[in-house]
Structures are given as C-alpha cells and as structure tokens.
Image: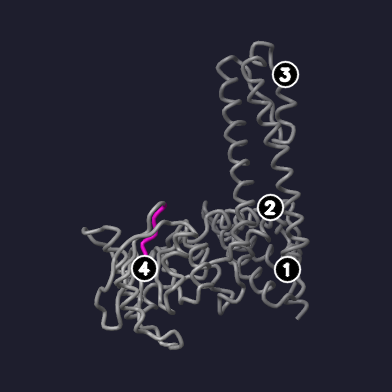
Amino acid sequence: MKKPTHHLIAEVPRSSSKVEMTIGIDLGDVWSHYCTLNQDGEVVDRGRFRTTPTGVDKWFTDLPRVRIAMEAGTHSIWISEQLQELGHEVLVANVRELRAISHSDRKSDQVDAEKLARYARLDPTILRPISHRTVAQQEALTLIRARNLLVRLRTAAVNATRGLAKPCGYRLPASSTLCFAKRCMEVLPPGLVQALGPVLEQIASLTVKIKHYDRLVKQLTQTEYAETQALIKVYGVGELTALTYVLTLGNKQRFKRSRDVGCYLGLRPRRSQSGDRDPQLGITKAGNVYLRSLLVECGNHVLGPRGKDSTLRRWGLHLAERGGKQSRNRAIVAVARKLAVLLHRIWVTQQPYVPFHAEAA
C-alpha cells in the first residue's frame, strides 16, 4: 500500500500464521477504495488503487498475509483469485446479507471499505462469505450468457417483426424460430419484404450463431466438464442446463446438504409468520435468475405431455391435481426445486440416475 502502511505492516513477521491486519476493499469499476485496520481495530491507512491486475499486484504483492474483505460484484471473481494466489485470506461478502446489516444514510466508498474491514476483523461470519467460481469456470459461463443474450435478441426481433406486419393487414404464420425467417419471406408482399427483409436476415443469422454456441456447449460437457454427463441422464435435463448448473454452483462441496441448493437458487417459499398468521407466499427468487429459469423450464417439460414417466413426474402431477388455478405453476416450481436437489446429489455421488428410485430400493 502507501509507504506509511508498509512501515506499519512490516512489523508483522511473514512467517506468522495469525492475521494481524485486516483490509476492507470497496470495489469500483475504475478505482477501488481500501481501509486498513491494525490488530487493535485502529485505522492505519486509507486509499485507492486501480481496478486492474497490475493495480492489485502493485498494492498487495509486498504485503505479509492479511485478511481482506470485499463485496461480491463484477470484479470480485478475478480479484479474489489473484489475492489468494498472493497468499492472503480473502472473504467475499454476500451482497444481500451485507445490505441488510449495513444500511445507512452516510454512504461512501471510504465508509463502505471501513465497514467491510471491521466486520471481517470482529466476526467474518456476519458477512456470510460466498465461494466464487474460478476464472476458467467464469469464462465458460460467459459463453452460456452470450448465448442467452443472442436468444433474447432473436426473440425480440421475432416479436417486433410480427407486430410491424399486423398494421399492414398481414399476420405472420406460426413457426419455430429455426425456420421463421424463411417462412415469412415466402408469405410477405414485396413492400414488406423490402422493409422487414433485413430484420429477417438478422434473425436467420442469429439462429446460425446460436447453433454454434450449442455445439460449443456440447463440446464442453464432453471434455472439460465430463461430470455433467451424469446430470444429463435425468429426464428433462439437457446439456445446457447441466453445464449451467455445474458452472453456477462452481464447487459441489460448497453445500453440506443437497437440499440447500434449492434455497440457494431461490426456489424456497418465502415465509412471514407472526402469531396465528402464516400465509402461503411465493418463492424467494434469490440466487442465479438464469439457472432458476432453466430449472423451471425443465420442470415444465417433466410435467408436460412429452415428459417421460418417472417418480418425479408422478409426484408433480399429483401435486398439480390438488386444486386451485395456480396449482400447476406451483407444481412446476416444486419439481424444479426437486431437480436442483437431485442434480446436486448425482453430481456429488456420480451415481446413475434411477427414474423409479422407490421401486429400485
């Protein structure tokens, strides 16, 4: 850090396993602010550094082992990995928990950095530290997110094309997105072909690029992440869902119980019980939105007309028949939660999927 800080920290021997200094970092896109506390909780240094690999090396390479706390965010994955390689103890705070305990009307980067340092010094568990995936896993996950971006762009283009054709008296035919552009070019009049032709060309181009991403996803499941092959055996789960599941969770050992994965992905019902009042509420919707949506799609397929018979399907259909106009939607979410737990259990044990586990037992 700064020269005065080097002087203060130099008094701590490098061979000591005990953490004598605690640093809180408020990460920013360009500049990141830090606050350093000594063993007695006194502020010995404040400052900022560039949010770049070079900036991190410049300020933290020559330091003895210290405890560093930061908030989960865009840059926390690579910065935490780089700091761990430099030998420091790194705590990445859960954003939801941190906001719940540190709400204040006196917010600034310097204040946030000091709060992180004090929480990490007194009781690190208050930060509910999370486990980040590796940079290599993040790169593979970026591929999946880029594919999802193209899918959303294609959906928006298809919907816009249908909407633009209706005021002219033309209703475009029902079609899958794979052949949507070709079918529309065949039925549109010359005037609309001139107007909507470039959009349809973009839709066709997006379809080709999405197919390319699908091939890359399949390749990753067969090579670098071969453990996903056991997950694909589950009825209703495809290669995209299995790879997204493994990459989002990062490490299968981070959960002591498989049932905790459903809560982590926001598939647990919320609760607001007080006295005799205990209403039924929706799910928390915490955690990764995209993975949760994929699991819900899988649950919808399991309960759909093309779903294969299994214990999970029978349980979900029985739940959907219990009445109420929202019973099927609740059943789909419940099946998604069961899938999240089942996939983690198969991932940990690498045992083959048994559709009718009760009969097999």
The numbered disc on residue 1 is: 4
Q: Measure how far apart labels 4 and 2 are at the Cα level.
A: 59 Å
Indicate the amino acid at tag 3: Val
Q: Residue 73 placed where, x, y %?
A: 45, 59
Helix, strand or loop status at disc 4? loop
Helix, strand or loop status at disc 2? loop
Task: Specify whether residue 234 is in view.
Answer: no
Residue at image location 63% in from the left, 20% down from the top: 196
* Segment tinted magenta in the rendering: 24-29
Query: Is residue 26 found inside the magenta-colored segment of the image?
Result: yes
Residue at image location 62% in from the left, 31% down from the top: 158
Residues at discs 2 and 3 in contact (Cβ within 8 Å): no
Residues at discs 1 and 4 in contact (Cβ within 8 Å): no
The numbered disc on residue 227 is: 1
**Residue bearing mark 3:** 187
Q: Residue 312 placed where, x, y %?
A: 68, 66
Image position of 162 (left or right of 21): right
Q: Measure how far apart labels 2 and 3 are at the Cα level.
A: 32 Å
Residues at discs 4 and 3 in contact (Cβ within 8 Å): no
Which of the two discs, 2 and 3, labels the residue nearer the N terminus?
3
